[in-house]
Amino acid sequence: MINDRLALLRDYPFRRLNGLLKDVEPPRDVEPLVMSIGEPQHPYPDFVTEQLTKHAGLWSKYPPTNGTSEFRTAVTDWITRR
């Protein structure tokens, strides 16, 4: 059973924009901007994989609502540097 109101949703704006721009040829000496969001364009650093693997067993648990002490320290340090 699907909610009838889903039919009222409009198309995603960037999909519509892609349709509007599909026949537009940018000048050859200009690299067009990618008008999408959320898709990484560069590989992430190796330490990310290492940390995800190291803490994989914690993915089934909620973090403390106030964050870990390490997180709070990192936020405090960042705000101080800012």
Image: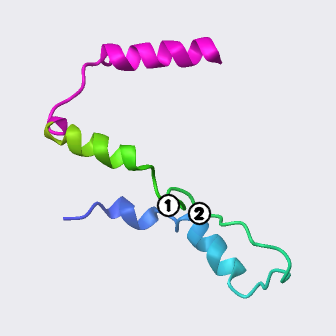
CA distance for labels 2 and 1: 7 Å
Q: Is residue 48 above or below residue 41?
A: above
Count neighbours of disc 1 (C-alpha within 10 A) and say few if under 14, some if 14 to 19, many if 20 or more. Answer: few
Tell whether position 79 is magenta. yes
Placement of the N terminus among the 4 image quadrants: bottom left
Q: Is residue 25 above or below residue 74?
A: below
Amino acid at the residue labelled 2? Ser
Q: Is residue 66 visible?
A: no
Measured as percent of width and height from the top left, residue 54 is found at 21, 39
Report the number of numbered marks: 2
Where is residue 20, by image quadrant?
A: bottom right
Q: What residue occupies the far bottom of the structure in this picture?
A: 23
Which residue carries the number 1 mark? 39
The part of the chain drawn in magenta is 58-82
Q: Residue at x 32, y 49 (%)?
A: 49
Q: Residue at x 65, y 66 (%)?
A: 34
Q: Is residue 36 left or right of residue 31?
A: left
Count neighbours of disc 2 (C-alpha within 10 A) and say few if under 14, some if 14 to 19, many if 20 or more. Answer: few
Question: Which of label 2 and label 1 is nearer to you?
Answer: 1
Q: Is residue 51 left or right of residue 36?
A: left
Q: Is residue 27 left or right of residue 70?
A: right
Label 2–label 1 contact, CB within 8 A: yes
- Secondary structure of the residue carrying tag 1 is loop
Measured as percent of width and height from the top left, residue 68 is found at 30, 18
Measured as percent of width and height from the top left, residue 77 is found at 52, 14
Where is residue 29, by image quadrant?
A: bottom right
Q: Residue at x 79, y 85 (%)?
A: 25
Tell whether position 81 is magenta. yes
Q: Residue at x 53, y 65 (%)?
A: 12
Image mark for residue 36: 2
Q: Is residue 14 above or below residue 18?
A: above
